[in-house]
Image: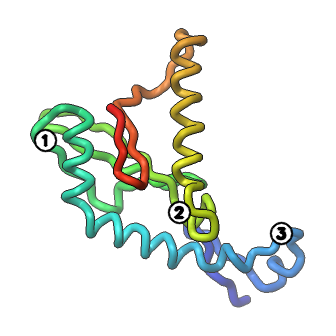
Amino acid sequence: MATLPLLRRNKISLEDALADDDNILHRLDYPQKQHDFCSYLLSHKTDIESLVSFHLGVNLCEIADEVDWLFGSYNVCIPVYVNRPFGERVLIRIPLPFKVGEEKHPGNSDEKLRCEVATYIWIRENCPTIPIPFLYGFGFLNGQTVR
């Protein structure tokens, strides 16, 4: 039975796609869009490393190889090594533009980030016993950063 590729090495057959209540046509583009976005990020490797160095206030950061990147439903988390080999590892989390509708509705990525940062701040202030990752900083598509 022939199948079509989806994200996370999943596949779907024509029969399953037709039986599914959801329209999966847009999901068929996701593997190529994810590949293109990863290529874009890799082409900006030095910029990402500089940005992480700035937010952490350190001199040397190195992003992990692409095979070590972590993908969720709406984000890619890139491991970044600080002062390798003995330093620590942090993650930079970047929304996947094709999953948050950035192409058709510019600003969605920034809005998603604003909501997540506000949630981090609210949890830290109102529920300090709940463990959450430390937020070192964040930045928007227009270049504005907060650390």
- The amino acid at mark 3 is Asp
Instruction: Establish if 135 lies above or below 68.
Output: above
Q: CA distance from mark 1 to mark 3?
A: 45 Å
Q: Which residue position is annotated with label 1?
A: 84
Label whose residue precedes the other's in the sequence (2 or 3): 3
Pointer 3 local density, CA inside 10 Å: few below 14, some 14–19, many at least 20: few
Query: Marks 1 and 2, how far apart in space?
Result: 30 Å
| Quadrant in which the C terminus appears | top left
Residue found 26% across the figure and 43% down from its top: 52
Question: Callout 1, which amino acid?
Answer: Arg
Q: Position of residue 57 (x, y in %)?
A: 18, 32
The residue wearing badge 3 is 22
**Which residue reaches farthest bottom?**
2
Q: Which residue is mark 2?
A: 97
- Determine the residue positioned at 27% across, 53% down: 48
Precedes in sequence: disc 1 or disc 2: 1
Residue 85 seen in the current view? no
Expressed as whole percent of the image width and height from the top left, the position of residue 59 reads: 10, 39
| Dot placed on the residue nearer the N-terminal end, 1 or 3 | 3
